[in-house]
Image: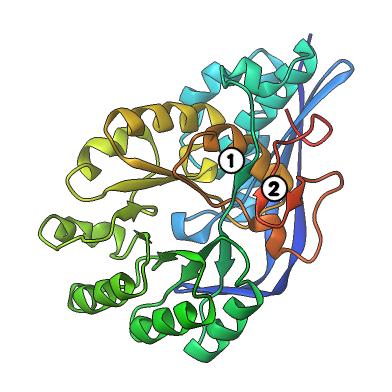
Amino acid sequence: MTVELAVATDSWPIEGGFTIARGSRTHAHVVVATLTSGPHGGRGECVPYARYGETVAGVMDEIARLAPEIAHGLDRESLQLAMPAGAARNALDCAFWDLAAKQAGVPAAQLAGVSAMTAMTTAFTISLGTPEKMAEDTARARTRPLLKIKLGGQGDDARIAAVRAAAPDARLIVDANEAWTEDLFARNMAACLAAGVELIEQPLPADADGALATLARPIPVCADESLHTAADLERLAPLYDAVNIKLDKTGGLTEALVLARAARRMNFKVMVGCMLGTSLAMAPATLVAQGADYVDLDAPLLLTRDREPGLVFEGSTLHPPRPALWG
């Protein structure tokens, strides 16, 4: 039966805005691919990211261009070669998984060989700001068990100390989004060590991360912008202790599952993260997040509103998706 493709974009307001080292945002702009075959439909959501040269219009065009090939039989397996890793392939890949689950009448997790899905604890993100502002934001979230702190380079030692004082009992991980330099590394690492930080994401720019081979890493360092697919792991092995798997970087659930298995074989710690999207984007990532060392799928909690139905959160506990949402 012929598969028809539709592509659309949505914009979702972010509660209070969101700031990282590269800038601030007030809305999450997403792209949704829908595949329809007879009575069944599947959806996938992606978040185009300027850091990787992506735009909403460009990603929509990439997806739409494949409509004739999809109508003539291009499937999820052949998609992996027809399109490079990135947001556009993610939306289509996840839509294929959702469609297959609906057609088979079984959960996508079962099709993917993921055993019984269980609830998980997600990190909750504290946006970058002054130490005082970050302390205020942290104080409001201090009962959450795991906080992810966005950092920005200069002044991060003060930010980390302020956050720890505001949430003395929370577990902390930090994300520098490539904002540190080699000169700042030792001082910021010492501040993280003093605050009991468990993991540091992407401290150095991806094109300068070779320096990590010679820098002391008393806290595990996690690759984010430096990691896209399993093909990157060999280069990263001497430099990083953990990897952050995001479906918008891997180009979908298919490659994300391959990457997660390969990373574990190579003894990396595994984080499963996300861009700023809705529950529809998070849902496929929950399959990869089963058994992950760190889960960072809190994007729906940062939005003013989410899709209905969306994922169910109880505090920082994230429950597996229901078929009405995805899979």
Which kind of residue does numbered mark 2 sit on?
Val
At a point 31% along the width and 33% down the height, the residue shown is 231
Asked which colour scheme the image uses, the reply is rainbow
Q: Which mark is residue 88?
A: 1
User: Above or below — where is 284 with respect to 306?
Assistant: above
Q: Which image quarter holds the C terminus?
A: top right
How many badges with numbers are in the image?
2
In x, y percent, where is residue 114?
A: 57, 22
Q: Specify the quadrant of the image occupied by residue 319.
A: top right
- 218 vs 48, left or right, is left
Residue occupying image coordinates x 57% and y 65%: 125
The residue lying at 39 percent from left, 36 percent from top is: 229
Tag 2's secondary structure?
Answer: strand
Is residue 69 shown to the viewer in this render? no
Residue placed at 46% from the left, 60% from the top? 51
Residue 317 vertical placement versus 102 (above, below): below
Asked if disc 2 and disc 1 are in contact, CB closer than 8 Å, the reply is: yes
Q: Position of residue 41 (x, y in %)?
A: 81, 25
- Pointer 2 residue: 31
Could you say where residue 189 lies in the image, as x and y percent from the top left? 26, 71
Which residue of the protein is positioned furthest toward the front in this rendering?
A: 169
Q: Is residue 307 visible?
A: yes
**In the visual, does 207 lie left or right of 264?**
left
Label 2 vs label 1: CA separation? 8 Å
Label 2, residues with CA under 10 Å away: few <14, some 14-19, many ≥20: many
User: Helix or strand or loop: what does disc 1 sit on?
Assistant: helix
| Earlier sequence position, callout 2 versus callout 1 | 2
Q: Which residue type does callout 1 highlight?
A: Ala
- Residue 228: give x, y in percent of width and height: 40, 42
Place residue 211 in its image quadrant.
bottom left
